[in-house]
Image: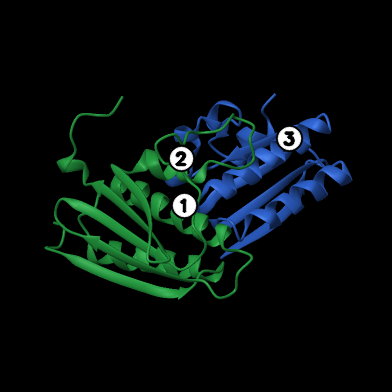
Chain colours: A blue, B green
Amino acid sequence: MITFDTTVANGAATVIEATGRLDMVAAPKLKALIQSAVTKGETPVVIDLSGVTFMDSTGLAALISGLRVTRQAGSDLRIAGATSQVLSVLQMTGIDRIIQPYANIDEALHAA
Amino acid sequence: MPPSRAELTFAGPAQGGCLDAIHDLMDRLWRADQGVTDTDRTMFTTAVLEVANNIVTHNRASSDVSISLALTADPTLLRAEFCDNGSPAAVDLETIALPGAFAESGRGLALARMTLDELSYERADCMNRWRLTRHRSAHRGPPHD
């Protein structure tokens, strides 16, 4: 199970706070939320992963999809607060080299 | 200390809902195995759920496929065995590898293989059987290349 809480920060950036398991059931919902933010022009998109207890390869794929759609719109997707299991998956797959994990939301929002 | 031996089982339809049941089963396993390291717990849980995802995804078009899972934790090994009556899986575990960085699928079994010491698949008697084994960190050999 997962819940998503979406807020718009600083009048532009979207912060999506995920809480629970980011798996094949949750991944389509996250992709839709990212697409919605891009459509509204509320970018960059920051995913708060501090409440994600487990992420599988389909959750990872949702992040990569989000990176693609935000970059196609001339913006960016950032992730923050990844827990140890999430960091392990990012590192084993090498995705931490294309989506840099930030320690917290503030760092991600203020990244260049 | 790990238990002398813990065994847990699950059986149900191979549909998305079974993933929550498998997560719950893993949580029960770790509650019974208080000595498990964070690395072993993380890696083994990741592998089990990736194989479960693969089975569910592979059989998404069929509503009559059943899946069973047996988890075993003993002092040296963590094991899982999945059985399902779905269609044969066309996989070659020897050649499976991570796709390109921007690929949006195809990482599940590669990830499972990376987090296990042994991953096998066989088709027999109209059943698919997946066996997963991870040696506990204290009983691991030197790192693989």
Residue B68: x, y in percent?
A: 39, 70
- Tag 1, which secondary structure? helix
Label 3's element?
helix
Q: Amino acid at mark 2?
A: Ala
**Residue at 56%, 41% in the rendered image:** B106
As helix, strand or loop, the secondary structure at mark 2 comes to: helix
The answer to whether residue B106 is left or right of residue A38 is left
Residue denoted by label 3 = A68
Residue at mark 2: B110
Amino acid under label 1? Glu
Q: Nearest to the eye among marks 1 and 3: give it.
A: 1
Give me the C-alpha separation between circle 2 and circle 1. 9 Å
Counting from the top left corner in percent of width and height, residue B38 is at 31, 48
| Apparent side of residue B50 relative to residue B25 in the rendered image (left or right) | right
Mark before the other along the chain sequence, 2 or 1: 1
Q: Quadrant of residue A80?
A: top right
| A42, A56: nearer the viewer | A56
